[in-house]
């Protein structure tokens, strides 16, 4: 499979906004995010159904995929940003225009439920995508400077990305020693696991697997991580990067349970290569932007993740 990188983003470019999962939590947050992007000198085009609602979904599957495919096929749109995550992106995967994504590669940014689409675009189109901030969720309030710095650097510069550093006050922890090189792949653990065994899940052979999650009980994290072992994923990767597991708790603190650290201790015994814990990405206000599909070097002894190539052309 040939890797496809999108062109870098330039001032004046048009950014398309979509809601492939749930609708924006508030119209005010969406409008604030739009003003933020326009204030930086970008044009903004919202999908026709970006604010639609059908239960916890942003409209019907047909409406949401129409917005996505419309942006993929619009030659004026240079980047596609998700307004928020939520639920429902996997329902769109059979209907995505992967040929358009390969023919007209564009920057695509999101995290959480967007993991399903990002992994599918890598599997079916070879497209590099970005786990990063979303317009209503992150830019709908005063953006965090650390988040902004690393986000715009990756999207606007065709220079080699280099190191993805945690904030100084939040160092990563080396959990298994060593160094390894592979392609960065992963995202939200529950979405990655839900796609295993489908035509939209890539091979993780030789990858540096990056994982995070939010609002999950410890026993459910244990179950999903065990599924990765039983599916042979951990045996095939070169290294593991554990991100933030935000607001994850025991199901019933009054009953016996494994702590999250105990779960991770067991998981790390299943991983043959180096591993880090505490990587600053995912469901946190301060987040790194992670370019999925790029070659990177993990050095668990030094606590670093270094991307070895540019993210955009």
Image (cartoon, rainbow, N blue to C red):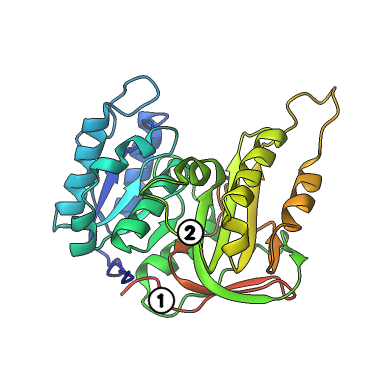
Hey, which quadrant is residue 250 in on the image? top right
Q: Residue at x 27, y 60 (%)?
A: 106
Give the image location of residue 184, x and y in percent: 50, 65
Q: Is residue 104 left or right of residue 21?
A: left
Q: Residue at x 47, y 75 (%)?
A: 161
Q: Disc 2 marks which residue?
A: 148
Mark 2 crowd level (few <14, some 14–19, many ≥20, 10 Å Cα): some
Q: Residue at x 33, y 38 (%)?
A: 20
Give the image location of residue 183, x and y in percent: 49, 69
Hey, which quadrant is residue 160 in on the image? bottom left
Hey, which quadrant is residue 257 in on the image? top right
Mark 1 crowd level (few <14, some 14–19, many ≥20, 10 Å Cα): some
Dot 2 and dot 1 residues touching (CB under 8 Å): no
Location of residue 264 with respect to 295 vertically, above or below: above
Q: Of circles 2 and 1, which is in front?
A: 1
Q: Disc 1 marks which residue?
A: 310
Give the image location of residue 67, x and y in percent: 21, 40
Q: Earlier in the sequence, mark 2 or mark 1?
A: 2
Query: What secondary structure is found at the residue carrying circle 2?
Result: helix
Q: How many marks?
A: 2
Image quadrant holding the C terminus, namely bottom left
Would residue 258 be seen by someone viewing this image from the given angle?
Answer: yes
Residue situated in front as seen by the camera: 73 or 194: 194
How far apart are the alpha carbons under marks 2 and 1?
Answer: 18 Å
């Amino acid at each position: 499979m040939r890797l496809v990188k999108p062109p870098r983003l330039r001032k004046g470019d048009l950014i398309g906004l979509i809601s492939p999962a749930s609708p924006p939590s508030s119209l005010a947050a969406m409008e604030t995010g739009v003003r933020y992007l326009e204030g930086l000198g970008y044009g903004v085009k919202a999908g026709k159904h970006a604010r639609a609602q059908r239960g916890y979904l942003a409209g019907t599957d047909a409406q949401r995929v129409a917005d996505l495919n419309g942006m993929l096929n619009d030659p004026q749109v240079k980047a596609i940003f998700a307004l928020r995550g939520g639920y429902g992106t996997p329902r769109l995967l059979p209907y995505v225009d992967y040929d358009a994504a390969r023919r007209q590669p564009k920057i695509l940014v999101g995290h959480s439920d967007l993991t399903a689409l990002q992994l599918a675009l890598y599997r079916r189109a070879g497209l590099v995508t970005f786990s990063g901030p979303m317009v209503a969720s992150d830019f709908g309030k005063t953006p965090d400077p650390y988040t902004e710095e690393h986000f715009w650097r990756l999207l606007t510069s065709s220079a080699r990305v280099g190191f993805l550093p945690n904030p100084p006050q939040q160092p990563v922890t080396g959990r298994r020693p060593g160094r390894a090189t592979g392609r960065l792949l992963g995202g939200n653990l529950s979405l990655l696991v839900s796609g295993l065994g489908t035509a939209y899940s890539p091979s993780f052979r030789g990858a540096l697997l990056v994982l995070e999650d939010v609002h999950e009980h410890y026993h459910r994290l244990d179950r999903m991580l065990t599924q990765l072992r039983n599916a042979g994923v951990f045996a095939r990767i070169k290294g593991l990067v554990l991100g933030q597991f935000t607001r994850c708790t025991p199901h019933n603190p009054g009953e016996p349970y494994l702590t999250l650290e105990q779960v991770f201790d067991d998981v790390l015994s299943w991983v043959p290569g180096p591993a880090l814990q505490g990587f600053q990405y995912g469901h946190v206000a301060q987040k790194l932007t992670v370019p999925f599909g790029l070659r990177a070097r993990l050095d668990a002894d030094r606590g670093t993740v270094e991307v070895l190539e540019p993210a955009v052309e």
